[in-house]
Image: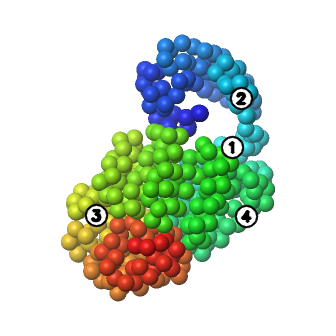
Amino acid sequence: RVASRTSAFQFKGRSQDMRKVGEGLNVTTVLEGSVRTAGKRLRVTAQLVGVADGSTLWSERYDREMEDVFAIQDDISASIVSALRGRWAAGESPVPTRRPTEDLEAWQLFLKGQHNWFKRERGSLERAAHFFERAAERDPSFVAALAGAANAYASLNLYGMEPGAAGAKAHAAVQEAVALAPDEAEVRTALGIVGLCCDFDPVRSAAELRRAVSLNPSHVIAQCYLGFALACSGQLDAALVAFGRAQELDPLSPYVQAATGHAFLLGGRLPEAEAQFEKAADIDADFLLSLFGLAGARVALGRHEEGVSALERAAVLAGRSSFFLGWLGWAYGCAGRRADAEGVLRELQERGTTEYVAPPFLGAIHAALGEVDQAFECLERGLAERNAIMMWFRWPLYTSLRTDPRYGELMKRLGLGSP
């Protein structure tokens, strides 16, 4: 197994005892080195180190042109396989993966897209979609870039883009990817994400994500979204199996840790959700996916002001995005700060005249204020518009509505099982 990039990069730039690195990543060997550039020249130094005793198993230096970066990667991979050859079982050998693109600029754009996709706020997701689309323009056969664009637009349906536009762009990108490589794990993952966030079909979404996992058991995002599809549908135990596998693959990723926290949050296991979000915060205190989840858990546990404080910080970090303002308005209402909640509600309603504001968030604030009929009116609009927040209906935003018969009816219509 190979530790993921996000987990490995938690050690970047630090002077660490190699044994601690090995323990943190659950690996027995570590590849370390450096990259330096001068104009179009590239110098890469790399060494493979045994964690147990710190011995160097292999080392090399490469002086090449920038255009040779993929060849350097291939050379390093081949050298590692050769150095570790004695560890493979009889008849086994690593299967080299094909290069996703031969275009260096397309690859750099793709990496920028990935970096922004993980940030979990509207501006970053819009930048992610832009980078993925530019990468696909540079190389129309770059399937992972097309899948990335589909994932970005599907995520934007959750984080503030108008659902019709987000869904149309997500479907266009994923269908183009399907036409090129229907059996790629990246493509089946994108189909699963689009199925959940845009099509409101958690059953088909889970099926696509299981197929993605069968194609590539090490695909962390496929494991996470399989967990989301199951947790949203009330299948928490099965969801935690998928998230457990994701944590094995990427143990130091704030995204994986926070995503697991959201599974607990969706399942109503609030103390475990809080503990999980705290793990994510230990890795990255400003990671928005964990910050608003931690706040939501604390508000639901009755520690309202702690939750409000965290959501006020999240709103600032996200540039007062409507997504985070929705959470903040709900927290104000739960804390009994009616004037503050009504102020956020007015702000969102006013912004709704010039930009898209998700009706489910207006509904959450109404629910926290005890305005039940207005809350359900907003939720009906969210369902009609296919706003992705409705798939996360088990979030504590709507807990106060659960005794109303309309809550269970909405759950059935959403295909999310029983309350």
Q: Residues within 10 Å of mark 4 (few under 14, many from 20)?
A: some
Q: From this viewpoint, which residue is outermost toward the front?
A: 90
Determine whether, in the image, residue 293 is placed left or right of residue 369.
Answer: right
Residue 164, percent from left and from top: 60, 75
Q: Which quarter of the picture shows residue 78?
A: top right
Please indicate, yes or no, whether residue 210 appears anywhere in the rendered image.
yes
Q: CA distance from mark 4 to mark 3?
A: 40 Å
Residue with the mark numbered 3: 300
* In the depicted structure, whether residue 364 falls above or below residue 315: below
Q: Earlier in the sequence, mark 3 or mark 1?
A: 1
User: Which label sits on residue 107?
Assistant: 1
What residue is rendered at 49% in x and 31% in y?
26
Q: Earlier in the sequence, mark 2 or mark 3?
A: 2
Residue 112, percent from left and from top: 60, 47
- Badge 1 marks a residue whose secondary structure is helix
Please indicate, yes or no, whether residue 382 appears anywhere in the rendered image.
no
Q: Nearer the viewer, mark 4 or mark 2?
A: 2
- Badge 3 marks a residue whose secondary structure is helix
Q: Residues within 10 Å of mark 3 (few under 14, many from 20)?
A: many
Whether tag 2 and tag 3 are in contact, CB under 8 A, the answer is: no
Q: Residues within 10 Å of mark 2 (few under 14, many from 20)?
A: few
Q: Earlier in the sequence, mark 4 or mark 3?
A: 4
Q: CA distance from mark 4 to mark 2?
A: 35 Å
Q: Residues within 10 Å of mark 1 (few under 14, many from 20)?
A: many
Residue with the mark numbered 2: 92
Q: Amino acid at mark 3?
A: Ala
User: Which label sits on residue 175?
Assistant: 4
Q: How many marks?
A: 4
- Badge 4 marks a residue whose secondary structure is helix
